[in-house]
Structure formats: structure tokens, C-alpha cells
Amino acid sequence: MRKTSSLNGTILRQAAKDSFVKLDPRALWSNPVMFVVEITALLTTYFAIRDAAGATATSFWFDSQIALWLWITVLFANFAEALAEGRGKAQADTLRKAKSETIAKKLNGEKIEPISAAQLRKGDIVLVETGDFIPGDGEIIEGVASVDESAVTGESAPVIRESGGDRSAVTGGTRVLSDWIKVKITANPGETFLDRMINLVEGAKRQKTPNEIALTILLLGLTIIFLLAVATLEPFAIYSGTTVSIPVLAALLVCLIPTTIGGLLSAIGIAGMDRLLQHNVLAMSGRAVEAAGDVGVLLLDKTGTITLGNRMATEFVPAPGISAAELADAAQLSSLADETPEGRSIVILAKENFNIRERDIAALGATFIPFSANTRMSGVDLQGREVRKGAMDSIEKYLHAKGKSMDPQVKLAVEAIAKKGGTPLVVAEGSRALGVIYLKDVVKGGINERFAQLRRMGIKTVMITGDNPLTAAAIAAEAGVDDFLAEATPEAKLKLIRDYQGQGNLVAMTGDGTNDAPALAQSDVGVAMNSGTQAAKEAGNMVDLDSNPTKLIEIVEIGKQLLMTRGALTTFSIANDVAKYFAIIPALFIVTYPQLGVLNIMHLSTPQSAILSAVIFNALIIVALVPLALRGITYRPLGANVILRRNLLIYGLGGLVAPFIGIKLIDLLLTAWHLS
Amino acid sequence: MKGADLSQILFYIVVLIILAIPLGRYMAKVFEGDKTFMDKAIGPLERLIYHICGIDAAQEMNWREYALSLLTFNLFGIILLFLLQLLQGHLPFDPQGFGAPHLTTAINTAVSFVTNTNWQSYAGESSLSYLTQMAGMTVQNFVSAATGIAVVVALIRGLSRRQANSIGNFWVDLTRSVLWILLPLSVVGAVLLASQGVIQNLSPYLTVHTLQGANQTLAMGPVASQEAIKELGTNGGGFFNANSAHPFENPTPFSNFLEMLFILLIPAGLTFSYGKMLKDVKQGRVLFVTMLVLFLLMLGTTYGSELAGNPQISKLGIIGSSVMEGKEVRFGVVNSALFATVTTATSCGAVNAMHDSLTPLGGLPPLLQMMLGEVVFGGVGTGLYSILIFVILTVFIVGLMVGRTPEYLGKKIEGFEMKMAILAVLIPSASILLGSALASVIPAGTSSIANPGPHGLSEIIYAFASSSANNGSAFAGLNVSTPFYNLALALAMLVGRFGVILPVLAIAGSMAHKKIATAGAGTFATTGGLFSGLLAGVILIVGALTFFPALALGPIVEQLLMWSGKAF
């Protein structure tokens, strides 16, 4: 997925071709501003042709130049949109290759019946073996396999998919590398994930988002207002004893209506979805991207997002009369064969703190006692030593069985660790407790600053965890989140989301399990992990192909960037009008009222070149801003006021000043080249 | 600028602020149904009115019901006032024996007073009976002002309520506006004005012998009582044709000061009520400051231009101001400029100098303020709801730049609100532009012009701007007492009034439904200097750019011509 994003010659050529196709009024209808420009271009062309027929050479030369530039204005706007779509189309082509025709092994009872993947329907069960492409989206009902999902995610390392649990979903178009699985198909052809993805990136079913609709209404309103201002100019001119030609009125109108934002609006929206795609996130609708910018609360799962996935041993707390080194030695022995990350971390800590080297458990002749649900302890027996480690209550039970009891000092240490948010593991040898291992949730590096950033952006972070409130509070404090939900159940999660929404907040969350589905559906921005279940992917409105929960933060930033780009270009577009008035109004009436020359503050050489310069500037600014529209304006995680001041300075003030300079420069060139 | 002039302006503004703040708080209490010191006196009267009219004061309305009540009430007002004029010859209190006015004049006048415009295509003292003035004009002066207040109160409720369906009861808002606010204030106002010599009687007109030996008829009437509400309700319809330039309406410098104060008092006070009702005084203050800044900008232009005067007259060696034509010597340049700015900033339209005679550039701010839709303080109620439309536009255009979909007071601004806000800006603009464009090319329009050239165009544009913005001040010079202007301007007044009120009520209704998001560091702040500047910028760019071509061909070119030695 992250390959074909850069602009290349093919995309540019295709976009240039498409900008002519898009001249079709039926296609332009949805963009009222550009539709009006096209009408005026047609009208002006008609007048230019009439001039040619009537052999009025001077006005033909002028009118045809205006007509030309009005057409160019529409073409530039079309080009911007086509370019934005072009990137998606290229990506869709890559995806289509993955959708090559596959033969599915449909299971009829125990019998295998080979049919075309296109004939599979929801509920069919298929067998997929080593080397086979998975014929459609589905859930694994039996078996485990390693799957190459690079066609969808771009990630070349294979992933494990197995029946039951949260890793059971498979995507059509991916390939089984080893073993076999039985898959129950969950999507009809044409509705699969890959199909939807192709539709999305192609923008085939692109609908205007609520904010785009509102903005279009504003632009339409401004267009009508300026249409009135320009249309009524003719009667005022007649009253003043002059007339203004239709091409000149058309030029004035096109300069005044917000063509810059009107021409770039849809490109900005498409580019926003495209930027998400660069981050390997698929947004199911533009509405979700827009909502991301508005998010006020982020619900973040503790494990994997805030903390590293596993707890780590950070300290040995010995019982009275035992040295820390003795405790470390016993703890290390008991963990040598323990392949869990916690176990590994104990071995590492013992080496770091007491230089206890790793020993070969087989060479020692030791017997490893693995963790069992029954005893809830693990440990090792060697040369008569019996070392056990486990939670406090299980070790206590173990000691009781031997007629001993837990040292009260150890109990105190256990409580202290629990209070700090850690997990205490008690180590016992023979009939006495040696001390406690402090296992700690390790908060990811840099996450604290990330949350502080979010806070400055006005976004509240809430940690979701299954831990008890005590542990949760300690981790929340360390990570710097604003709030936490401990002992979270799916119901509690759903209720939390509804509460925040009730207060007027938009809520974003990530999830992967089937039990996350209701919360994902309820949230305004629900990012499902691609590794998650089908139910989760259906419920969310975005899918993260990298399955990286931290990405929620980038998603929010992209949403904000999209909205800011829209606002900045709207402001720029409206601010431009001031200069255009000063170019055109004196030019219109200079003959009747030479005194109006005072308003020609740019000292444009002739009325014709003034009008032409304004129209040319108006067209060129669209194409000049295409890169900005596609890239989005720079976003920095700062408070609203700081961002606003910065953007106002660049796009508000810039919008006022830029056209004065631009129009003057074009006028100088036109005069130098004798074009007007 | 002269020191004395400056100190008069400063004094005026300081007194205005000192009075507007407590009045604002008081009005907020009135509309939130809190206890006020007037309750004991007025409460029984209010209950009696509800009892007689069969109004259930506790019954709230949604925006459609609210709008329907308002329209019905105003329609009956128009019909009643129309009939009253036609029948005045057969009714009592008509000592001069005035008959029915021309049909189109009667329509124009009825619409004019009901829409709070008070455009007068008639001369009050020579065509209307005392009954018509008192039972018709004065009553509408109260209730048309109260209608404006009711609309803004409904809008405030819509903005502040959380997921509600209703925006208040029109009849209650109307009644309370009249009984608690307009009536007590105008009683105080009338007494103060009468103390300055504004007349108040029902006598027949006096005939006096002048020193030159000629006979002169002096019009009499119940002036003081109508004068106070004329200003307080930003109505502006003078008892006499000369309006506040007439010595019986405005006899002394103090009465002039009072009248200017009355005009801005309620509109300025409402910005403070707004803050109080939202429980966020800053939101109201920022609107007040924005209005004040725009006001000073406009005042500065008019005053500066009047002070600079007309170079052609100065050339003649005249000592003193060169632009005293159309001004009362009693008021001079500064008080004429201040009055002109005050009266067009609000939708009042009372005048103490003839705007037609202002220098072209001096006449531009009055014209522009009306074109902007009376948002610089504006009419009672109308000013606040009109500027709130611009607030919504500003929040939408600029608010996106902070990276959130636009919201105001925690409420999302979406397609519907945008549609209505645009309509509220578009409709009056269309009325001004289309109306004056039509009038400037058809004989029925141009034949009324007294001065040719750009000044004539200014006169036409001014007439349509004044009607559409429900201001009612006239540029004079244009004979509007013709069937064409009577009907065209009546239409402009209706469109300009209800073409804004309906979208505003629709916004109130849809905003009331919405959730309120808590503000945070990521929220676009709608208070403070930055927002104030942005709001003023959007008002000037969106509002003024629409009219730039028209203004360029009217006052701007006229001023340039005047400098180069050509006058009209």
C-alpha cells in the first residue's frame, strides 16, 4: 500500500487528460463555483466568436484572452481534483492485482469442490492450504496458519491466524504460507474488504462530508452575492452613462467568487484520505477523517498503546535475613526455563544487578515446574532445592500446605508494590518466602510528551485497562493520561463513550476484539486493527493495516490538518477579493470617471491589462496552491489560539497581500510582452 | 480634530457604557424570568394581558410556532395601521381635518412602521391625525421594537439551551419587552425631553404672526411621548417632517445628547444581556467592543470628512465650516456627524441633519452601515441578531483554521445553519442591489432624482439600503412619494425585515437542538481581541465588498469629483 504515493509522470498525464473530461457540466454541477466559471467561460467564448464575426479586432483579442483564461481556470481546478484522485487510482491498481482470479476449495461436508472465488457466498466453508490464496473474507473455524498479508498491508512479515479468539479473521487476496485452515466466508463477492478498499482509494463512492456540504453552501452563497453585485453593476453603469461588456463582467465575477477554494475543495478532501492511506490507515468515509479532527477524547488501551506489552522485573525485595543477591539467585533459577517475557526479564535483571550468569537448566539436572492453572505457580526442582514463584495468595497456600506461614514483612512489601501499580511475585524456597520480585508495567518511552502534546491540542486521553483501580491509577499517573477506566468491561467502555458523547465530545478509540465491536460502533472514530476480528473491522470506521494502536494520534492530526487546509484556503480566497476590486473597478470606469484612477493603487498600465492580470492571477493561484492542497498545511500540536494566529498571518494577511504583488507582476509581464 | 469635539464624543461613549451595562443586566433578568424591582408594579398588568388574550405564558414554542406567531402579529399590525390611516378623517383627534393619504403612501407607511423602519414618505405634521400618530405610529414604535427584541431573545435561548425543542413564547417575550423595558424607559425619556421643551399637547396648530408680518402655522401635538420611543425603539419616525432637526422635537444640546443616548442605549445594553444570559460575560463584551470599534471607524470617517469640508466653498473665503448646508447651526459639525453615525449604526433613522447634504465621503459611512445590515449596534434586537449571523460566518470561515469543524458556544455549525446565515446576509443585499439597479434604469425611478450624476445614484442606493436595512433615514433629495417608490420600498422593507428574522429564528431552532461541547485548549475562542478583529474583518470584507462597485460609482466617485472641482 505505501508504494505508489509519489507523483509520477503517468499520474500527471492521466490527470491532465481527466481535467478535460471533467469539463462535462454534469460532473461540474456538484461544484457550484466552478460551474459558474464554466458558464461565464462559455458566455465569453460566445462573445469572442461574435467579435471575430463582426471583425472588431481589438475586442476580439481581449475577449478571447479572457475566454481562454476562464477555461484555464476551470481546467486547473479539474486538474487539482484529478491529481488527487490519480494517486488513489494508482493504489487501486496495485490492489486489483491481488484480487486475481482464484479457485476456491469449497467444502461440502468432507468433500472438496473446486469453484471460482467469484461464486462464493456468505456462509460457504472453504479449505485453504499451503500456497493457496484465501478466496474471500472470512473467519477461521478450524486450524492455524501463517499468512502473508502484504498485498493488503504492505507488511512482508507473515502473521499467524488461528481459529477462536481475536486473530481469526482473514482477508481475501492474502496467501497461506504454511499449514491449513478452514474458513467460513463472511462477505459476498464485491463486498469484500479488498473491494471496499479499491472503491475507497479510487474515490468511486466519494460523498461530500457534512463540513464540505456546509462549506459548499457558504461558497455558493458568496457566489450568488457576487453574482448580484456584478449583475447590478450594469444598470449602475448605464445610469452613469457607460456600459460594461459581458466578458469584462464575466472576468470580474470570476475574480470575485471564491474560485481558489472552490477549485481545490474536493482535492483537499481526497488528499486527506490519501494521507491516511500513506499511514496505512483506511478510512471508510471522509466523514470519519473529518470527525478525527474534532475528536475531544481518546480512549487508549493500556497494553500495547501506553505500556509495552509485558511487565518487566525491576527490583528484588528480599525478606528479612535474606540478601538481595540470594533472592535474585533463586528467582533466576526459577525463571531459567520460563519463556514468558516476564520470566526473561527476571533473568535479565538478575544479570544486570548481581551479575548472575545464565545457567543451562538441563546441565544442572533441574526439573522445570511450568505454570499450571491449578497451583498458579511455576518453579524449579534441583538438587533437593525447591524454588517456587507466584502470586502472593498461591505462595501463601503453598507455604500453608507445608505448615508454615508468610513473613509479615514480605506481606508488607507485596502491598507496597501493588500500591505503586506493580505486580508482586513472591519467591519461595523450601518452606520460606525469600522475598518479592517487583514486576512493573513499563510505560513506552516518549508517551508522556505525546499526551502533553495532545493536552495542548485540547484532547483528553483516557486509559482503558482491565487492571484494578490501584494499579491503573499508578500507571495512569506515570504515563500522564488525563483519566483512566479500570477493570474495564465492554459495557463499561460503551457507557464511558456515551457519557463523553453526552457532554458534546467526539470520541476516538482503537479495538481489535469482537467484544470491542459495540464500543467501536458507538465511537465517532473507531479504528479497528487489521489483525482483529471481522466484527471489529465491520464496526469501526477506519482500519489500521499496521495494527498499531498508537496511530490514533496521527489519525487525529491528519483530520485536523484536513480541516485547517480547508479553512486556510477559504480565508485566502476571500481575502484575495480586496486586491481584485482595486484592479478591476477603476479599469471599468476610468473612461467615464477619470478620477477613479486614484483607486488604481497598483498603477496597472491599461484597463485591459488590469482586468486580464486579475483573471490570470486568479487562474494561476489555483494551480500554484495544488501542492499545498494535496500535502495539507503544516500541522503542529499547539493550542488553538497559537495555530490560529499563525495561519491567519500566512493565509489571511498573505491572502490580502499576495494578489497585489501577483497582479502587478503579471501586468508588468503583459505590458512588456505587448499582450494587452 | 478639535479638542471640544473629541471630548463630546468621548463623554457620549462613556455615559453610554455606564448606562448600558446595568440596563443589559436588567434586561437579562426580565427575559430569564428572574425577579426585578419592577415586578410589583407591572406583574399584575402582565397577568391581566395574558388573561384577556388567553395566552398560556408557560407554553413554550418551537421556532416554527414562534415565527408563525410573529408573522401573524405583524400582519395584523400592518392591516390595522393601513385602515387607521384610510379612516382617520372619520375618527376623533383630527383637529386639522386630515383625510386619507394616497393608497400607496398608506401601504408604505403601514409596512414602514410595523417593520421598525419608519421610512416616511409622508410629512407627519401635514398628513396624519393625532389618533393615527398615537394609536398607530406610537403603538407600532413599541411593538415593532419589541418584536426585534423577542427575536434576539429567542436566538439567545437557541444558542444557550442544550438539546431543547423550544425557544420561548413569542407573546411573553413581546409583552415583557414592552412592559418591563420599552414602556418604563420611554416614560423616563419623555419626561426628560419635555423638561427640555419638547412639546406634549393635543391642541390645534397655532397660527402666529412673525416679525416680518407674515402668518405662520406652528404644528402642535403629543411629541415628547413619541419622541422618546422613536429613539429608544430605534424607530426614527419623526412627529414632524424635519425629524430631530425640528426645535419642537429636539430643542436643546442636552435633548440632542439624550436622543443620541436613547438610540444606542438598548442595542448596546443587549450585548451585555447576551453575555449574562449565556453566563459568559466575555461573549457579550466582545460583540460590544467590535461594534464600538466599527462605530468609531465610521464616525471618524464622517466627522473627518465633514471637518475637511468642501474645498470649493472654502475657496470662496467662507469663515468656519464649509459644509453647514443641511445642518442645524445649534448642533454644528460634530453633533451632526455623531447623530448621523448613531442613527445609521442602529436602525433608527431619526436625523438631526440632512444626510443628503453631507460630504460624499461623509455620507458613505451612514450608507455603508445600512448595507452591512445594521450590525454596528443596530436596531433594538435586530443589531444583535444580525451581528450574530456574522459571528456564525466568521466562526465558520476562520474557525476551520484551528483544525476543528466550526462551533460556536460549543455548538457545531453545519449545513443548515450555514444555509440560513447565508440567506440572512443574501436577502437584504439582494433587496438593496436589485431594487436600486431597477430604479436607476427605469424612468419611474430616475424621474424622482433631484441631483444628477453620482449623487443621484447615491440617493437611490441610499433609499433602498435604508428600507432594506429597516433604518428609515432618508438621503432626501429623492422624491419617494411616488407609487413606484412607495411600493418598491415597502417591498424592500418587508423583505429586509422578515428575510432576516425567519432565517434567524430557524438558526435559533436548530441550534437549540444541539449538544454543547465543553471548550478546551483546542477550541476556537470567540472572545478576545483576535476574534473581535476577525469579526470586524469579515463584516467589512463580506459585507462591504458586495457593495464596493455601487459605492465606487456613488459616493466615492462623487468625492473624487468634488476634490477635482465638480459638485452635484
Image (cartoon, coloured by chain):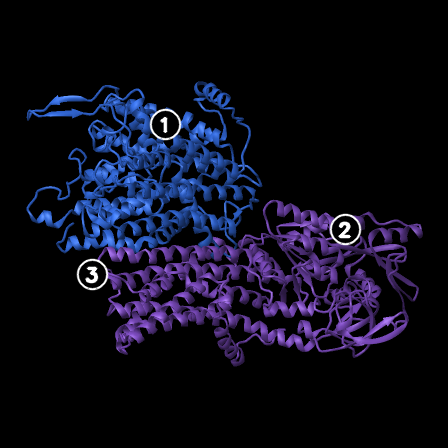
Chain colours: A purple, B blue
Residue carrying label 2? A413
SS category of the residue bearing label 2: helix
Give the residue displayed 35% in from the left and 47% down from the top: B372
Element marked by disc 3: loop
Q: Label 1 belongs to which residue?
A: B139
Q: Are marks 3 and 2 on the same chain?
A: yes
On the same chain, marks 2 and 1? The answer is no
Residue annotated with mark 3: A592
Residue at image coords 56%, 40%: B162
Is A637 on the left-hand or right-hand side of A531? left
Q: Position of residue A105 (x, y in %)?
A: 82, 75
Cβ atoms at labels 2 and 1 below 8 Å apart: no
Callout in the foreground (3, 2): 3
Q: Position of residue A268 (x, y in %)?
A: 51, 65
Mark 3–mark 2 contact, CB under 8 Å?
no
Inter-mark Cα distance, 3 to 2: 96 Å
Q: At label 2, which amino acid type do we have? A: Ala
Name the residue at 15% across, 54% down. B563
